[in-house]
């Protein structure tokens, strides 16, 4: 498959989708320098080991897994590793993992000596189709997700679909939720193809989703308008993520986005999206109190003067941005959420 190109002038980079790319990593990445390889305990260690074995001067950091590690403490830990080992502007950082590792390692690379080379090797479907591409790097702070960060594009993204063989089913489904998000809001042709063809190869799915992401990001890198389309399902999704985190049956990010999309879709689009979500065993409803939902929406960092700009998809492939009050959003959730 030919490499994809994220066209961003001097910050352009290629995205390689290739089975076995990890084996041939030196064909793609320049590793004859100091390399900070950042991974977590949830990622099979064979992946980071493969990369470490090809580096001239590797420094491996294996963090605990989970969103709670996207924090100032772990960020400072990465900076410390680099200062202690004399990293300079010519050295680099490689993230090997999902969105948490990519965002955290990317932010460390973005800020160390005002920016050193960053390579992303995403190992979850969700990070392969969304978070590894587009340059959003960040950590959480003060109870807000991604509140401290920067737009900092990777030098290259290496996607090896082979790594998905070790990904658990629930995590795989979360990646499918983000793929469905991109197709439903922006690419009717791919949505229709997936809807009618159960056997679309994974490489094709990844490529089609990334083509959406590339088109959107290359037109609006800093999210002044169009890029907000990638937040389809995320306003309600984030709220559900906060609410469910307090319960024993905590939902994953992609699962919350799945339910969030249904809340923001028109009648026909909702029917079709729901069918696809069901195919991948993603949730299509959630039970919570109106009060919790209202509180969680009020905590949204995009909530200005009580209104949030949301993405609505009335018909597959067509989106619009709408400013809505918290009550209007709650109203849209009726029929999808079980509100107590
Ligand atoms: N994941 C949404 C974005 O990259 O803008």
Image (cartoon, helix red, strand yellow):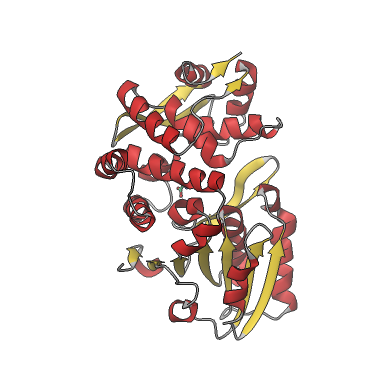
* 67 relative to 286, above or below: below
State the image quarter where residue 268 is shown: top left
Which is more toward the observer, 209 or 296? 209
Name the residue located 59 percent from the left edge and 40 percent from the top edge: 252
Numbered marks: total: 0
> The N terminus lies in which quarter of the figure?
bottom left
Q: Position of residue 82 (x, y in %)?
A: 69, 74
Q: Position of residue 51 (x, y in %)?
A: 57, 75
- Left or right of 2? Residue 227 is right
Name the residue located 75 percent from the left edge and 77 percent from the top edge: 84
* 323 relative to 111, above or below: above
**Residue 249 in sight in this render:** yes
Q: Position of residue 160 (x, y in %)?
A: 46, 65
* 288 relative to 176, above or below: above
Check the image and name the residue furthest to the left. 189
Q: Position of residue 328 (x, y in %)?
A: 47, 18
Which is more toward the observer, 104 or 174? 174
Check the image and name the residue furthest to the top. 340
Which is more toward the observer, 282 or 154? 282
- Left or right of 264? Residue 60 is right
Name the residue located 42 percent from the left edge and 47 percent from the top edge: 223
* 327 relative to 160, above or below: above
> The C terminus lies in which quarter of the figure?
top right
**Residue 29 in sight in this render:** no
């Amino acid at each position: 498959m030919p490499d994809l190109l994220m066209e961003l002038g001097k910050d352009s980079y290629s995205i390689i989708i290739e089975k076995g790319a990890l084996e041939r990593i030196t064909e793609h990445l320049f590793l004859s320098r100091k390399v900070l390889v950042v991974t977590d305990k949830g990622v099979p260690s064979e992946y980071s080991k493969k990369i470490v074995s090809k580096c001239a001067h590797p420094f491996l950091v294996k963090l605990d897994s989970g969103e709670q590690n996207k924090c100032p403490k772990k960020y400072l830990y990465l900076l410390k590793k680099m200062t202690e080992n004399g990293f300079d502007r010519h050295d680099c950082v490689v993230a090997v993992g999902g969105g948490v590792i990519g965002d955290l390692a990317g932010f460390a690379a973005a800020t160390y000596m005002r920016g050193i080379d960053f390579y992303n090797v995403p190992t979850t479907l969700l990070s392969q189709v969304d978070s590894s591409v587009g340059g959003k790097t960040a950590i959480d702070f003060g109870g807000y997700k991604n509140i401290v960060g920067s737009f900092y594009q990777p030098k290259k993204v290496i996607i090896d679909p082979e790594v998905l063989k070790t990904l658990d089913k629930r995590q795989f489904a979360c990646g499918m939720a983000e793929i469905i998000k991109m197709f439903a809001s922006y690419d009717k042709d791919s949505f229709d193809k997936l809807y009618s063809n159960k056997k679309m190869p994974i490489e094709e799915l990844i490529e089609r989703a990334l083509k959406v992401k590339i088109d959107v990001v290359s037109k609006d890198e800093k999210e002044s308008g169009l890029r907000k389309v990638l937040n389809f399902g995320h306003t309600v999704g984030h709220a559900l993520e906060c609410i469910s985190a307090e319960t024993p049956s905590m939902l994953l990010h992609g699962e919350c986005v799945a339910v969030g999309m249904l809340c923001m879709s028109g009648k026909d689009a909702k029917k079709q999206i729901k069918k696809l979500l069901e195919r991948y065993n993603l949730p299509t409803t959630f039970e919570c109190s109106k009060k919790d939902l209202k509180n969680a929406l009020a905590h949204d960092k995009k909530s200005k003067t009580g209104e949030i700009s949301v993405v609505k998809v009335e018909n597959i492939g067509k989106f619009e941005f709408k400013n809505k009050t918290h009550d209007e959003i709650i109203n849209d959730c009726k029929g999808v959420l079980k509100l107590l």
